[in-house]
Amino acid sequence: MADVNVTSLVDVMLVLLIVFMITAPMMQGGVDVELPRAEARPLSPKEGMVVSVNRDGRIFVDQTEVSFRDFRVTFRSLVATRKPSGVYLQADTRVPYGDVVRVLAVIRGAGVQNVGLVAQEEDPS
């Protein structure tokens, strides 16, 4: 009776393990946003939607980039479909205030009652 040689299978498993260990940290990306600082304690995570505005003024809904025009047109239907418990708005500290207000107006216009502004905790020093 012929035995199965598992040495090559173990080699393949080790190579796959190494590949996954190297690529896993790269997959934990997100939108590069430098948050403003504020005196606030961290909130517990909720089932919500994250809207980000990066330093270039580009808008992301849960890491998917959309133009402001598309955001304005489709956000209401997206909220109606997903029914989030709230929307978290994170804007880069270098984004003009007017751009943040325009995005916030679209969020509020979609009927979202719970809007949270995301900020980094300020150092007490």
Image (tube, rainbow, N blue to C red):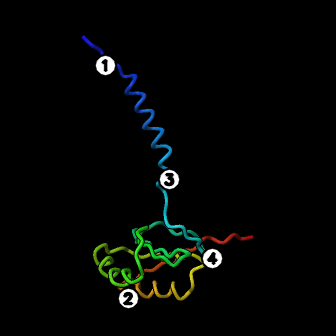
Q: Quadrant of residue 79?
A: bottom left
In screen coordinates, is 40 left or right of 125? left
**Which residue is situated farthest in the right direction here?**
125
Question: On residue 4, which mark appears?
Answer: 1
- Mark carried by residue 38: 4
Residue 26's mark? 3
| Mark 2 neighbour class, 10 Å CA radius: few under 14, some 14 to 19, many 20 or more | few
Q: Secondary structure at mark 1?
A: loop
User: Which residue lies under the disc numbered 2?
Assistant: 109
Q: Amino acid at mark 1?
A: Val
Kind of residue sitting beneath label 3 = Met
Task: Tell me the kind of residue under disc 2.
Answer: Gly
Per the image, label 3 sits on a secondary structure element best described as helix
Mark found first going from the N terminus, 3 or 1: 1
Q: Of the residues shown, which amino acid type is indicated by label 4?
A: Ala
Picture coordinates of residue 63 (x, y %)? 43, 67
Number of other residues with Cα within 10 Å of mark 3, as a class: few under 14, some 14 to 19, many 20 or more: few
Confirm or deny contact between disc 2 and disc 4 (CB under 8 A): no
Mark 4, secondary structure of its residue: strand
Q: Residue at x 36, y 73 (%)?
A: 84
